[in-house]
Amino acid sequence: MALQDGALEISGLKKSYGRTRALEDVTLRCRAGTVHALLGENGTGKSTLVKVLSGVISPDAGKVSVFGRPLTAGSPAEALDAGVVAVFQEVFVAPNLTGIENLFLGYDGLFAKRMPLARKREMGEATLRKIARVPIDLDQVVGEMPLIQRQLIVVARALLRDPAVLILDESTAALDMNSRDALFETIRALVGNGRLVVFITHRMDEVEAISDDISILRAGRNVATMTRSSFDAKEALRIMSPEIASRSANGGET
Ligand SMILES: Nc1ncnc2c1ncn2[C@@H]1O[C@H](COP(=O)(O)OP(=O)(O)OP(=O)(O)O)[C@@H](O)[C@H]1O
Ligand SMILES: [Mg+2]
């Protein structure tokens, strides 16, 4: 498959929670070999979209396909099988298990079951070395680790699955600059390899540093998609929240 082909095709996704319309209508295409940033104010549906893409929740309507393969709605196993791996905003860990146990949690393919612990440790340490610029004791119980270490463990857990589509939902928020830069290098290597990374952040400097394409969600809709060369942070903020932008523009005039 050529690099420009669609790695992720999303059409007409809708999802409501009671009266809250988290996804109103999201239609979006993400290219293989790119970092596709998703921007949007709080509550615009970004994390809901992540959960639909990874099969954790079922949409009310709409379709998702990954590298040309249509996904059955609400099937985490199928999403995983298609190579979709998400790092959720909530930083899900098993707090009573150790770092090494968390790294291979849910990684229950035959291959991993048979893998000796020493091999797991070797793979886990090698993956963590790529992104962690703080020491992590893999024998420590994860619930006792500071947030930055827990965040690095869940990102490493995702990388260990060799994702075709890696989704990072505000995964840099808890990281220090060095680990974040190391993660960016890892992201570049992944997309250089034809993968897709969907990158959710609130930070414009991160968007400018890492993304190829940028989409903006507003009230559950994808309202704009642009390439980095045409990206302008002020314009993006205006699209994200036109009310705030017009208020501050009026304030500037008086
Ligand atoms: N499990 C749920 N039950 C009820 N409402 C929900 C649930 N999850 C999300 N929502 C609502 O759906 C809307 C979209 O939420 P979502 O978490 O997808 O936004 P977001 O763009 O990820 O926001 P943030 O930037 O704060 O992470 C919000 O109004 C939120 O309160
Ligand atoms: Mg969110």
Image (cartoon, grey):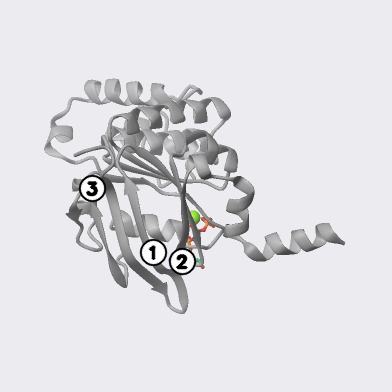
* In the displayed structure image, the side of residue 5 where residue 189 appears, left or right: right
The residue at 24%/63% (across/down) is 73
Q: Is residue 215 above or below residue 114?
A: below
User: Residue 153: where, in percent of width, then height?
Assistant: 40, 34
In the image shown, does 82 or 194 lie closer to the viewer? 194
Give the mark, 1 or 3, whose residue is nearer the N terminus.
1
Coordinates of residue 126 in the picture (x, y in percent): 33, 21
Contact, CB < 8 Å: mark 1 with mark 2? yes
Viewer-nearest of discs 3 and 2: 2
Dot 1 falls on a residue whose secondary structure is strand
For this orientation, the residue located farthest to the right is 254
Across and down, in percent, residue 184 comes to 45, 30
Q: Earlier in the sequence, mark 3 or mark 2?
A: 3
Are there few (<14), some (14-19), or many (20+) residues within 10 Å of tag 3?
Answer: some
Which numbered circle lies on residue 160?
A: none
Residue at numbered disc 1: 26
Q: Residue beneath label 2, please?
A: 220
- The quadrant the N terminus occupies is top left
Which of the two residues, 195 or 174, is positioned nearer the viewer here?
A: 195
- Relative to residue 81, is residue 148 drawn left or right? right
Label 1 – label 2 distance at C-alpha: 7 Å
User: What residue sits right under mark 3 in the picture?
Assistant: 80
Quarter in which the C terminus is drawn: bottom right
